[in-house]
Amino acid sequence: MKPQVHFVDRETSAEALGLFAQDDGAWVIGVRAKTGPVAAARHRFPKLKNLLAPLRIKGGTAGKCAVSRLPNPMNCGWFGAVGLGHPHALTRNVAETIGRQVATATCQPGLDWVFVDADFFPATAAAFAMGWVLRATPHYHAQSSATDRCDYADGEHTPKHLVVMTSNAELAQEFWDTLYLPRTEGTLLARDLMQRPANDLTPVALQTEAEAMRALGATVTALNATELKRQKLNLLHAVGKGSACPPRLIIIDWPGQADQDPDAPVVFVGKGITFDTGGISIKPADGMEDMKGDMGGAATVLGAMKAIAMRRAPQRVIGLLAVAENAVSGSATRPGDIVRACNGTSVEIVDTDAEGRLVLADALAYARATYDPSLMVDVATLTGAVVRALGRHHAGLFTPQDTTAMRLQQAADVSGEPLWRLPLPSPDDDALKSEVADLKNCAWGTVPDAMHAAGFLSHFASETPWAHLDIAGTAEADADTPLTRKGPVGFGVRLLDALICAKDA
C-alpha cells in the first residue's frame, strides 16, 4: 500500500486542519534561513519559537529534519521541524530532497498522518510529495510475517497519509496528477521489478508486467524465441537459449497524439537479463544472488513508459525490453561461438558474461530498421567498470553526438538523476576486432570495459542519434540513507520521462 497524498491551502482554518491532528499524526513546520518558521505556522502557533527550540533545526540546512513526541497546540502525537534553506534556492529538486529527508524522520511506528506546514508553492509542494512518497514507500518483500508491503520485521513503519500545505492546493494537485504522480508510479514500478527474485520475475512474468500497459493505451507485443529466430535477432536468442525460460523482445508502443509525426518516434531500449549466471563464463558464487537485478535497464524503461503513458505524452515513444535469462546448460552459448546479429554483423562471443551488450545490440539494430527513430537511448546495468569510474552517484553517458548529450544532460538536471559523459571509442578501435568475425563482444585484459561496451553498441546504432546509459552504479543503494532505502532506486525513470516531456518538466 502506497501512502496517500493530500494538498491544502495555507489559508485553511485551524479548525479544518484539526481534522488531521490526531495522536497518530505529526505536524512538521518549515524553517527558512534568516526568516525562521514560515509565516502560516507563526500565525497558527503564537509560541512557535518555544515549541521548535528543543528540535534544534536551523533553516539554513535544507532538509535537516527532526520530529519528537512534544506537547503542541494541535494535540498531535508528534511535532517536528524541517530546514528549507534560502527561499531563492528552493527548487523542485531541492524540495524533492527535503521530502525524502522528512520521510526518513517520519517513518515512525504508530504514525499514520504527516502534515507539513512549509508554505510551498504548488510545483515545489508536488515535488516534495514525490520525494516523500519515494522514500517512505517500502520495497517489495516476501517475509512470511507480512500481511502487506508496509509491514517490517524491524518495526519501521510507513505513514498512510501525507498532507502538504501550499499557496494553491488545486494547482498543486494538478502538478501532482499530471507530472509527479506518474513519475512516482513509474519509479516505484521499476524498484519493485528489480527487487523480485528470478524465480518470480521470469521473462514471461516481465512480459505480463509490460502487458499491463495496455490499460493505459499502449500497444504491447512480444517476439518469442521462434519469432526472434525468424526476425534474425540471433544475439538475443543466443543469450537466452540456455535457459528453460526462453528469451523474448517485448515492445511497448505509446502512440502519442495524432498531430505528432508517427514516423519519428523516440525509442528506449532496456537490458532485461532476469538472472545472470554469466553463462558458460560463469560468475563467482559470492554475490551472484544480486544478479536478479540485472534487468534494471528494462525495469527503468518499463517504469518510464508507464510515466509517459500516465501523462498522456504527445510524442510517440517505443520501449523495447530485450529479455533473457543467461543460464548454464548444455544448450547455452559457448565462448568462441560466432553469431550473426539482425543487421548482419557477425559477432564472436569470447565471454558469455558480456551478454548485456549482445541483447542491446540486437534490439538497437531491430529498432533502427523497424522504426527509423529520431533518437535511441539504451539503459543497462552493464559494467562494473562504470562503477569504478563514477561511483554510485552518476550514471555513465556515452554518445557520439554533442546535441544528444546536451538533451540527456538537460533531462538529468531537471530530474535530479545525474549523468557523466564518458569518452566513446572510435568505431575503428582495434580492441573489438576479431580474427574470425566482424566484431568480438568484449576485450580482455586491463581495458576500460564500459567504454568498449559502448563502442560495441555504437556499431548497431550506426548513424541514428543514440545514447547509452550505463546505470550499474546508480541502480541500487548499498545502504539506507536519508534520501533512499537500501536496494533498487528506480534510477532513470524520471530522467527518460523528462527527456520526452521537456517542456512540462
Image (spheres, helix red, strand yellow):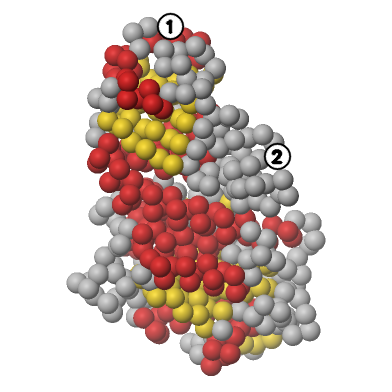
At which x and y percent is residue 271?
A: 55, 68
In the image, residue 450 above or below residue 267: above
Q: Position of residue 478 (x, y in %)?
A: 64, 45
Extreme residue in the left direction: 259
Viewer-closest of 39 and 75: 75
Q: Residue at x 40, y 52 (%)?
A: 183
Task: Say above or below: 479 vs 410.
Answer: above
Is residue 354 depicted above or below 61 in this figure? Answer: below
In this rendering, would 78 be left or right of 285?
left
Q: Are marks 1 and 2 in contact (CB under 8 Å)?
A: no
Numbered circle sitting on residue 21: none
Alpha carbon separation for disc pair 1 and 2: 37 Å
Residue type for callout 1: Asn
Q: Amino acid at mark 2?
A: Ala
Q: From the viewer's side, name the closer residue of 378 and 223.
A: 223
- Identity of the residue drawn at 43% across and 23% down: 21
Is any part of residue 81 visible from this angle? yes
**Label 1, on which residue?**
50
Q: Residue at x 52, y 26 (%)?
A: 24
Indicate the secondary structure of the residue bearing disc 2. loop
**For the point 40% across and 40% down, which residue is it?**
5
Comes first in the chain, label 1 or label 2: 1
Please identify the quarter of the rendering in which residue 98 is found.
top left
Q: Position of residue 35 (x, y in %)?
A: 31, 15
Q: Is residue 499 left or right of residue 202?
A: left
The location of residue 220, given as percent across then percent down, is 44, 76
Number of residues whose C-alpha sits closer than 10 Å to that of mark 1, classed few (under 14), some (14–19) or many (20 or more): few
- Label 1 sits on a secondary structure element that is helix
* Residue denoted by label 2: 153
Residue 323 image-quadrant placement: bottom right
Instruction: Give the class, few, some or many, for how many residues have Cα within 10 Å of label 2's Cα (few <14, many ≥20).
Output: few
